[in-house]
Amino acid sequence: MFSVSYIKSTTTKDASIVAALYVYGAMQRTLSFIFQKNDHEHAIRQADSFMKKVVDRFKASTGSDAFIQVHWIDTQWKYFKTLIDKYRETPNEANQQKLNTHCDRYWKTLGQVMKNQSQGRPFSQMIAIHVIIVLIYIPLIFVFIRRYINSNADMVKNYDPLTHIYNSRMFYRLVAQEIAKAERYDRALSLVMFDVDFFRRINDFFGHKVGDDALEQLASLVDQNIRKSDLFCRVGGEEFAIIASETDLQQAIVLSEKIRKLISGHTFRTVGRITVSLGVVQTRQDDTAETLYKRVNERLQVAKKKGRNRTVAKDQSNIESGS
């Protein structure tokens, strides 16, 4: 974006500011790439090359304010790269927060330096520096727009528009992923599936708009009362599923009963009380997403035949409702 010839031709004070702005832009580009799991190495290589040339430019100015600033910029860039390496090793929220915090602090410090150095500057120089800032942010704006468009596309493909939980397309993908993970680490995995009892009557009596509102309320209620690790999906019209990792059959039955009692004890807007029928299974060896769904659906159908508002697990055994 900025050639070293520009750095060489401008004043030492301006050159250090330009270098600092360039590095901030490089930090932001790298973050936008790595958080989207895109190739960020090119942005780092470009900034590394730029910083090497800038440091070389100021070798003869040892002890000057500009040299001290460039040394600080170089240190900040190198520390940023160590944080990137840590994030790549462990891509969790804590390491992501460290990266964002470092960039925020860098920008605040840079802003103070620019404020101090702006005293007594000709208006033309200040305009030039602001133009440089704009040039840095233009490509970042396009990156963020692309990220926003991609995230919205993912929302449409992977999430149910009514309940804002995973849709049936993602359900099968997530089940397959969790089965593979459970087999790899020898961990339990269970599936809880439930269906709203007599939901057609709600639609027929109150209308589809009220029925949709009831489903939205139900999904929100359940989503707020399960673990963060549980994957909640809308599988069909009034059919939902919870993929419970590291959960054996008995634990899944406890979860199922918790959900059943939570829903049956809740008063829903307009429609009042709702009950659900539930099926529960734990994965077996060589299970697939399709076989697991088939088995849990069989138990769900048994729960309906036995009177609804109950959990069925372990083939034909069931837990009666507490009515």
Image (cartoon, grey):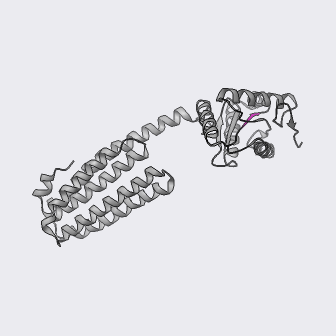
Magenta span of residues:
191-196
Horizontal side of 302 relative to 215 (left or right) equals right
The residue drawn where x is 71% and y is 35% is 283
Q: Is residue 204 visible?
A: yes
Magenta span contains residue 92: no
Q: Quadrant of residue 276?
A: top right
On the image, which quarter does residue 271 sit in?
A: top right
Residue 37, x across and y down, in percent: 42, 42
Depth check: 187 or 174 in front? 187
Q: In the displayed orientation, state which residue is furthest to the bottom.
A: 63
* In front of the other: 87 or 254: 87
Closer-to-camera residue (138/85): 85
Secondary structure of the magenta portion, mostly?
Answer: strand
Residue occupying image coordinates x 17% and y 65%? 13
Which residue reaches farthest left?
9
Picture layout, residue 35 above or below residue 79: above
Residue 220 shown left or right of residue 280 in the figure:
left
Q: Is residue 5 above or below residue 309?
A: below
